Amino acid sequence: MPPSSVPDLSSVARLVQAYSAYSLNGFVPEVILVGGFLIAILLDVFTRRAKSKSISIYFAIVVLAMAGIASAFQWQPFVAGQPWKPGHLIFPYSQTLFIPMVHESVLERGYAMAVVDNFSVFFKLLISVAGIFMLLMSLASQELRERSRRLGEYSSLIIGMCVGLYLMPASLDLTMMYISLELVSIAGYILAGFSRDTEHGAEAALKYIMFGALSSGLMIYGFSLFYGLTGTTNIIAIREVLALNPATHTGANFYILWIATILALVGMGYKISAVPFHFWTPDVYEGAPTPVTAFLSVASKAAGFGLLIRFLIFVFPEGTKTAAPVLDWQTALAIGSIVTMTFGNLAALLQTNVRRILAYSSIAHAGYMMAALVVGKADGTVAIMIYLATYLFMQIGVFYAVMLIANKIGSEEIDDYRGLMTRTPLVSSAMVIFLLSLTGIPLTAGFIGKFYLLAAVLTPDAATHSLPWLWLAVGVIVNSVISLYYYLRVAAAMFLKRPLRDMALERAGQTAPPLPAIQFGVPVSALLLALIVPILVLGVYFQPLVDFASGVVRFFNFDNIRY
Amino acid sequence: MPLSEIAFYVLSAGAIIFALLTITRKSAVVSALMLVMTFCFLAGIYLTLSAQFLAVVQVAVYAGAIMVLVLFVIMLLNLESEDIRITSSWKSLVGVLVALGVLAQILAMIFMSEDKLPKTISASAAVLGTTESVGTTLYTAYSFPFEMASIILISAAVGAIILAKKRLA
Amino acid sequence: MAPLSHYLAVSAILFVIGTAGVLFRRNAIIVFMCVELMLNAVNLTLIAFSQFLGDQTGQILVFFVMTVAAAEAAVGLAIVIALFRNRQTVDIAKVNILKW
């Protein structure tokens, strides 16, 4: 790399001025969130005397809704008169936030810290919806009611976490990736330990932060090797240097590139809880407050995938693979995908706690989505986005149902779920719908996610007309069948099995009086319906979602990504 | 051998020795003090690279703020010395072998690619390491991540208080 | 001037020492200290690359790593205190209500 001189302030000022018009537009959702974050901390002080303890949660819902709406305005519709073609610059459709200090020539091409494009807008909307559902869920949470004096901090941390989540899929620079990922992690550690007075809370937080700190340390070491190899931290500049300068990936540097990539993937794999970086998942999902678990399993995972897609497809696109054989990351990822889904499903079979079953099943779902990531390109990216959108409703829904049941019966053990159908038909049926959707049964949203995912994995190779990833698709199907067993075990306990207490009483020759019915209020049931409806609707009427996701990747030129 | 080179090897040896002491001492307090020494030696190494700003920040933030916090917590909890014996001997043996293997691999790669690495420190290095120069870059091109870093710190401050605060009666 | 490879070698050694500490020590506070050691090794790599390549980005990244390290240490130690209140121990091996 040619040495750059001391930064020349005048040229920086010129560029900041030139891009500031774009920059201010691009910032709006993040500015709303940061403002809300600061107000939420203070709000708690002023509303301490108020009757309702949940004011700050309502405030956070408003902030997230506003940020979501502001992101929706950043959506750039595809203009019919301008067909997308290879080599078409996306810059007119994207807005640059801040320009890092690279060389003058690079500056003029507008390399940036973060980008506002339809891809990041999609994830911002997804995260806002997940956040709003999660906050509504928090209102009904028993665990959080016990810590109601701390709800101001709770909502401010969720807003702060959303800032990081918004920026993760938008990052174009390793610096920005690291900072946004750490913002999400640190807010996550605190939220996981939020119910610290219960024994599980502090322990879950400790395990979360220890694995998190270790994997982020490994990741930043990988980033430092990338920086050393290419002399830049911008992922698009890294790609260009790798393509233009063969010395960066030949000889010994090839192995350094491998090590750097694997180390970088450790940090991201930790966020999506891919095997073998999953150790924290079951404990944190079991120990954290249920709304936090739901949020981590949806929003944190979605943003992790957004970051992963950006990183892999931007740094090692197919296009450079032919020009300069860089890395066969796809095979490595395919193996990781199979291992992750198989491990998640097999471990879930052995669990007796419903929350742990769901934790392991979320590892399996990460494995499915990694399969689509292997394919990369437009098909794979669209499939992941559709999958994430459907996964959002079913995952939050199933945790919501678990939380409602735990609020009343105080247990998450599968044996205590026996006979719940007669006691609370609404929540039990809702739970079954969520579980069927997680399995991927037709007429539910989960089926659509799986269908597009398999279609992407089974895309024939253009040159050879063979199916390069057939074995991966078979793996996904076999694993879906395995998952059916443990999902249906939960459903069967609720619908078919009789409560253990009744059986014990009958053995003693007594007749068992029926267990009392469980009642839920109207708002609680309404939220449950709000989660079921999208699952059933998306199960049959999914075209808008598919169009939406395809509209996102239309702006990616997978052979020549440039901003 | 010029003075800066001698300084580098002396400081590196010091940093590695104290790092090894950090992970092998039984008492947490001793470990923490050894780590402070490692950080100070590292600050010296930064100076041989003429990264003055980061050398000072290294001492102030790591050796100063973070390690003082760690020492406070250790003394607050009044910990007994940990039993250093690791669960089983074969496990630790495998672990040590893996660690050495990884290290050998990384070192081999670094030295194999030595011919491709820049031979000398850049001519602009002395200027790049000054507070003025780092500050200029930080507050212009990197102002966006800088602002986000401040949110991390606020979250951490809020979080540390709610996690560590005594339970209210 | 010592060559860049020697700086990278020192950094790799420190990184592996730190990782070994994280994996083998059972005292949660020492584990956090070992993570700090790992991050310091990364910082050395970044500064060495930055000064040898004549590009400032590496030093900026070090600044952010330090910020994050401070935040992580504060939160981590707070969690250790919360755990100690419940369990009177900071030994990771004894913290196993939730199975691994």
Image (tube, coloured by chain):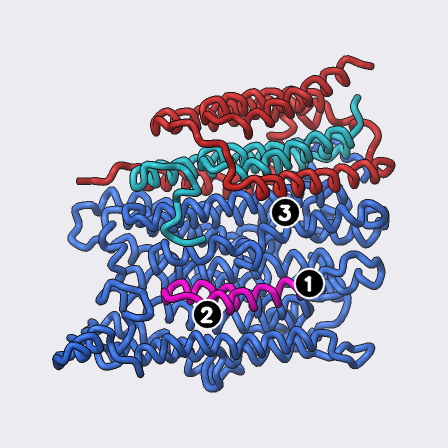
Chain colours: A blue, B red, C cyan
Viewer-side residue, A434 vs A164: A434
Residue A21 as seen in the image, left or right of residue C76: right
Q: Which segment did they paint magenta? A: A335-364
Q: Position of residue A448 (x, y in %)?
A: 52, 80
For label 2, the residue is: A349
For label 3, the SS is helix
For label 2, the SS is helix
Which residue sits at x=73%, y=40%?
B106
Which residue sits at x=53%, y=77%?
A480
Q: Which three-letter amino acid code belongs to the residue tagged 2?
A: Leu
Q: Residues within 10 Å of mark 1 (few under 14, many from 20)?
A: some
For label 1, the SS is loop
- Regarding residue A319, the answer to whether it shows in the image is yes
Residue A352 within the magenta-colored segment of the rendering: yes
In the rendered structure, which disc, 2 or 3, sits on the residue that comes first in sequence? 3
For label 1, the residue is: A90
Q: Which mark is residue A174?
A: 3
- Regarding residue A22, the answer to whether it shows in the image is no
Viewer-side residue, A326 vs A130: A326
Q: Position of residue A302 (x, y in %)?
A: 51, 62
